[in-house]
Image: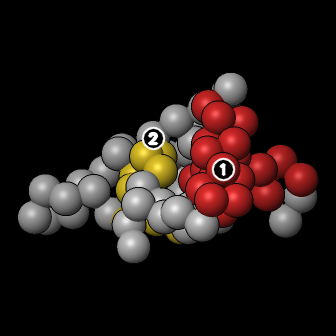
Amino acid sequence: MNRNESLKICLRCKFFRLKSVDGGVCRNEKDSSGNYPPKVNTDQCSFWEDCGQNYFIRQGWIKSQAKEGNDPEK
């Protein structure tokens, strides 16, 4: 895997919605029951699009949650 491919992770995708420090959901696709599929921050798929500055905002949120010991999903 080259460097460009390794950067195409869910945490850097505009369709990804962060739900906890470990993962979230992909808002580009829904399963048969109409729910968004859960994803881990490091997952990859063919729908990936760069989210730009939001990646750094997500990173900051994850760091602040880890520092405080908070995780909204737990």
Residue carrying label 1: 64
Which color scheme did the rendering employ for the protein? secondary structure
| Residue 56 on image: x %, y % | 71, 36
Q: Is residue 7 above or below residue 69?
A: above
**Residue located beneath label 2 in the image:** 15
Q: Which residue appears at 70% of the width and 53% of the height?
A: 63
Q: Amino acid at mark 2?
A: Phe
Q: Which mark is residue 21?
A: none
Left or right side of 71 for 69 = right
Mark 1 residue crowding within 10 angstroms, few (<14) / some (14–19) / many (20+):
few
Q: Nearer the viewer, residue 66 or 40?
A: 66
- Residue located at (35% from left, 45% from top): 27
Q: Is residue 52 above or below residue 12?
A: above
Q: Determine the secondary structure under disc 1.
A: helix
Q: Under tag 2, what secondary structure? A: loop
Q: Quadrant of residue 74?
A: bottom left
